[in-house]
Image (tube, coloured by chain):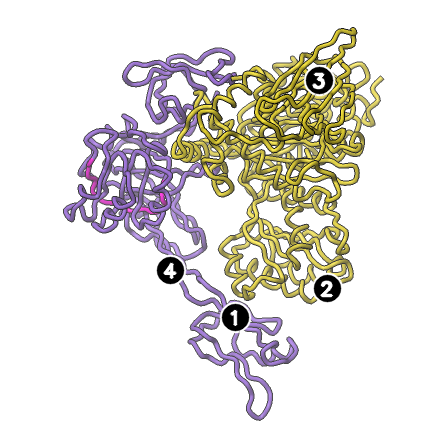
């Protein structure tokens, strides 16, 4: 049976596509070395549109209105610009209510886009540009440690890693955050209240790594402007031993958080990247393998959800679980010695 | 002699589900089509494979092992048609439920006319409605444009205007759709289905065809104010849904080639099968089919003159499961749990399950939560579908289901025949059927596949249905009554074919059974007490000829609707008792 892979790797090659959702200008160049905060592409998009119905306002036919419209597609017009003049001794004038760009003219109407927004795409982690995605972004390669998470609030940033988790299930409170942590990324176990998330924004932190998050905090976490990466799941889970060890031993290094949401269709996951110099040739890690004894696995569901263990046996045929389900299963030895029988679909290989 | 229209054709029907892909072989045995065997593999729509056809090949390869025949060539492509050496098969049909719900918006005129019909149309496939634009909408046209741009819908369904009726109002609605679509990147432009006034075809084409991703026109779903005709549009929408999936996943196109275009959304295929069944079997009672799986909950009801289909991705037990809290509170869901679970634990569980929808329950607490969720999801789905039931179908009490017999159940959450009692109790709790109904479990989830096969080979579904490929869970007797807990509400006498008999006295609040194995029939005499109604009228007795099943005759004496005790401890004890009564725990 195929096993999904959850990457927790001390040193690997990381290749990631960084692309904008809309077309724009790519600034990155092939083979360019980029830093995490370098803008590699940008685009602008309109927040709003205004439809000016010239024919209706002037009480004329659409063809006559088209003849009386003075602006053209792509014209950039300041507010109050005249775009059409009616008939008569004192002809009515139609003006733009706001500054904007003419998107389309026709059918006696003018569509303006207003309230332009700028989208800046940052590299996200230091590396080398190995491919350009025309109009969209670039593909960047780096070497370093990689820890994948399960939930992210769709922000990204980088900074120095501070470890505030004395143990994998440490609880972070607002009182532990102070101005000396400004611009850093803090790793902890869990957060129990929204005040702590707000306090992190006030410092301000550049990111937060949590082992888990409770349902009540999800909305606040989404509203935070700094990235939050959750490594293990929802509820009250300690950080898995591998991620805890890897992150805590890399404290004080520069880390990049890409808290993109988990998307099973594209394979995107929230990620923590710790760039490390390496001159040799490192393979990219595989994306799936067959289950086999000896593999390190992570439990995706109860019992022992979030724990890391070793798959000691893939059981033949189907196994009856306590609730009565018959499924392909394996025996997993959890860190600490306990062995449990787990449906294979509840496991992912760590590697 | 084979009696198929396509003589002796062997058929592989494939269902691409969210978690698994199944390949089912139907072939002619002794002159009639039979379900032969099924092969299963993991679905491969998601990363890292992102190619649905790989999972299909694996499922067919596993089917080959089960039946000892060769279906794939050296390059693992299907061998179509059968070769002289006997390898291969003659035809393939595909159903697909995997993939994210299609983001949809509805545009129409009146909220209780064309918009309501359009909603019913959109609910015939795996679509999620993000916005509705109608005549009574106070947003300006440019606000429509901005809202459409924010949603970036994959599908826009436009309805409105009776045939030969209003055109100006519809035209006004087409403009913002066209403009918004024009502003989207070409690869993200929505597919548009126009199912309104049939006199507007030329106008719709000229306004939209060059600006939208694709444009389809169907017969009007509301040709007159009094008439609704969704089916022709639903068929086109099913096709459009497959086209949208094709854009999302590279393997779908290959499946379309292999199946020669016989590829349908699973929900639509199930609805088609139910339309067929209701045309053949529906009498004074309707036929109901419920399908609960990871992708969606599906309710398909067949009445003599109308079939209703509702596909509800928001109530599926997979990646959308956490959204159920938008429709029911954690406390409402947990009232069905036989073990104590805190609302907070349930909420965290929902998020975890939506993150890993393919995972399964490995602890009793997990299973209790998923069973409680299944009940709530199914109950919400049937309530949603009930809005579309024909208004004249009689019900014993407002809010209750009309009489349905049989009730068919399929989908990963309901079709596990190793625990028919668990599934039957889930169905009884969630649907709360009334009167007399036989409950049939489609243990191989064949119904949608037969719905898809019907187009290719109309005899296959008929013959497979009559071949005993389904499992009867039992005949349920559910009186509508309210009485004191423990008081007798029904006396029953079952006379077996050999003349022996068994009796039962049904107490209010209990579930009891009388054995009647599958394949046997019996005569059941019912004497309702305290004004109970089992379908003969309040307090009226009657005699029925009934068929057996895995659980025999099941008397659900809990009344309708079921009132659960407010005391959590007593409630949980009662649920455990009901589970034990049906042989599950």
> CA separation, marks 1 and 2?
32 Å
Q: Are marks 3 and 4 on the same chain?
A: no
Image x and y of residue B148, in percent = 53, 57
Quadrant location of residue B40?
top right
> CA separation, marks 1 and 4?
21 Å
Instruction: Please give the count of numbered marks on the rendered protein.
Output: 4
Disc 3 on helix, strand or loop?
Answer: strand
Mark in front: 1 vs 2? 2
Extreme residue toward the left, this view: A180
B236 or B391, which is in the foreground? B391
Quadrant location of residue A248?
top left
Asked whether disc 3 touches disc 1, contact meaning CB atoms under 8 Å apart, the reply is no
> CA separation, marks 3 and 4?
75 Å
B168 or B250, which is in the foreground? B168
- Pointer 2: what residue? B166
> CA separation, marks 2 and 3?
59 Å
Vertical placement of residue B372 versus B209, above or below: above
Q: Which chain is yellow?
A: B
- Pointer 1: what residue? A73
Magenta span of residues: A152-164
Image quadrant for the N terminus of chain B? top right
Q: Chain A appears in which tint?
A: purple
- Pointer 3: what residue? B492
Residue A118: mark: 4
Image x and y of residue B95, in percent = 64, 33
């Amino acid at each position: 049976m195929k096993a999904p892979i959850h990457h927790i790797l001390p040193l690997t090659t990381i290749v990631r596509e960084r692309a904008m959702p809309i077309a724009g200008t790519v600034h990155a160049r092939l083979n360019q070395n980029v830093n995490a905060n370098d803008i590699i592409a940008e685009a602008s998009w309109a927040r709003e549109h205004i439809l000016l119905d010239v024919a209706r306002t002037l009480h004329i036919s659409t063809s006559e209105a088209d003849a009386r419209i003075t602006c053209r597609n792509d014209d950039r017009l300041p507010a109050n610009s005249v775009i059409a003049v009616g008939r008569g001794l004192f002809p009515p004038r139609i003006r733009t209510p706001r500054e904007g760009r003419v998107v389309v003219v026709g059918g006696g109407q003018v569509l303006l886009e207003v309230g332009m927004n700028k989208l800046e795409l940052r590299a996200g982690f230091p590396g080398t540009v190995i491919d350009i995605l025309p109009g969209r972004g670039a593909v960047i390669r780096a070497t370093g440690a990689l820890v994948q998470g399960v939930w992210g609030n769709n922000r990204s940033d980088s900074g120095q890693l501070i470890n505030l988790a004395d143990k994998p299930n440490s609880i972070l409170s607002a009182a532990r955050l102070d101005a000396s942590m400004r611009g850093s990324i803090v790793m902890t176990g869990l957060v129990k209240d929204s005040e702590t998330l707000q306090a992190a924004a006030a410092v301000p932190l550049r990111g937060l790594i949590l082992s888990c998050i409770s349902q009540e905090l999800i909305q606040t976490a989404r509203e935070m402007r700094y990235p939050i990466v959750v490594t293990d799941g929802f509820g009250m889970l300690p950080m898995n031993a591998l991620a805890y060890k890897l992150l805590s031993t890399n404290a004080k290094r520069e880390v990049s958080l890409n808290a993109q949401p988990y998307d099973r269709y594209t394979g995107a996951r929230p990620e923590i990247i710790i760039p490390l110099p390496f001159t040799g040739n490192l393979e990219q890690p595989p994306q799936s393998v067959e289950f086999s004894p000896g593999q390190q696995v992570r439990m995706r569901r109860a019992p022992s959800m979030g724990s890391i263990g070793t798959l000691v046996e893939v059981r033949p045929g189907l196994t009856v679980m306590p609730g009565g389900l018959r499924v392909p299963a394996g025996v997993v030895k959890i860190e600490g010695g306990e062995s449990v029988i787990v449906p294979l679909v509840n496991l992912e290989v760590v590697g | 002699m084979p009696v198929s229209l396509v003589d002796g054709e062997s058929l592989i029907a494939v269902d691409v589900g969210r978690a698994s892909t199944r390949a089912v072989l139907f072939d002619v045995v002794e002159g009639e089509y039979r379900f032969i065997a099924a092969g299963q593999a993991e679905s491969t729509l998601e990363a890292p494979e992102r190619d649905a056809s790989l999972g299909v090949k694996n499922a067919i390869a596993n089917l080959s092992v089960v039946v000892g025949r060769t279906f794939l060539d050296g390059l693992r492509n299907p061998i179509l048609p059968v070769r002289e050496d006997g390898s291969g098969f003659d035809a393939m049909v595909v159903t697909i439920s995997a993939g994210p719900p299609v983001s949809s918006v509805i545009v129409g005129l009146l909220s209780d006319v064309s918009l309501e019909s359009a909603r019913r149309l959109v609910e015939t496939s795996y679509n999620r409605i993000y916005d509705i634009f109608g005549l009574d909408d106070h947003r300006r046209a440019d606000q429509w444009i901005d809202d459409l741009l924010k949603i970036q819908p994959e599908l826009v369904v436009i309805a409105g205007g009776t045939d030969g009726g209003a055109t100006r109002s519809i035209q006004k609605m087409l403009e913002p759709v066209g403009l918004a679509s024009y502003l989207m990147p070409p690869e993200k432009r929505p597919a548009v289905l126009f199912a309104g006034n049939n006199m507007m075809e030329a106008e719709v084409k000229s306004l939209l065809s060059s600006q939208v991703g694709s444009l389809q026109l169907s017969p009007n779903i509301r040709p007159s104010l009094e008439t609704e005709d969704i089916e022709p549009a639903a068929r086109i929408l099913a096709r459009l849904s497959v086209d949208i999936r094709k854009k999302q996943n590279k393997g779908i196109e290959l499946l379309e080639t292999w199946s020669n275009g016989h590829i349908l959304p699973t929900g639509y295929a199930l609805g088609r099968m139910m339309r067929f069944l209701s045309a053949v079997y529906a009498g004074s009672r309707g036929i109901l089919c419920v399908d609960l799986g990871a992708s969606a909950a599906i309710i398909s009801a067949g009445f003599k003159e109308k079939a209703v289909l509702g596909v509800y991705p928001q109530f599926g037990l997979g990646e959308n499961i956490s959204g159920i809290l938008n429709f029911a509170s954690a406390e409402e869901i947990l009232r069905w749990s036989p073990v104590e679970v805190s609302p907070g634990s349930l909420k965290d569980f929902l998020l975890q399950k939506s993150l890993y929808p393919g995972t399964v329950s490995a602890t009793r607490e997990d299973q209790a939560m998923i069973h409680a969720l299944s009940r709530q999801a199914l109950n919400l789905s049937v309530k949603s579908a009930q809005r579309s039931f024909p208004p004249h179908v009689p019900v014993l009490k407002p809010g209750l289901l009309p009489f349905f017999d049989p009730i068919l159940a399929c989908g990963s959450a309901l079709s596990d025949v190793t625990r028919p009692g668990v599934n039957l109790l889930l169905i009884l709790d969630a649907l709360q059927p009334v009167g007399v109904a036989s409950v049939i479990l489609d243990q191989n989830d064949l119904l949608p596949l037969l719905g898809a096969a019907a187009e290719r080979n109309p005899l296959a579904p008929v013959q497979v249905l009559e071949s005993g490929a389904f499992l009867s869970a039992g005949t349920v007797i559910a009186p509508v009554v309210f009485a004191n807990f423990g008081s007798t509400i029904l006396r029953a006498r079952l006379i077996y074919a050999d003349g022996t008999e068994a009796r039962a006295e049904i107490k209010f609040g209990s579930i009891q059974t009388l054995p009647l194995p599958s394949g046997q029939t019996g005569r059941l005499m019912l004497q309702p007490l305290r004004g109970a109604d089992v379908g003969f009228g309040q307090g009226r007795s009657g005699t029925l000829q009934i068929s057996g099943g895995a659980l025999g005759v099941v008397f659900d004496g809990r009344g309708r609707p079921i009132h659960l005790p407010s005391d959590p401890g007593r409630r949980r004890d009662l649920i455990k008792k009901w589970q034990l009564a049906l042989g599950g725990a």
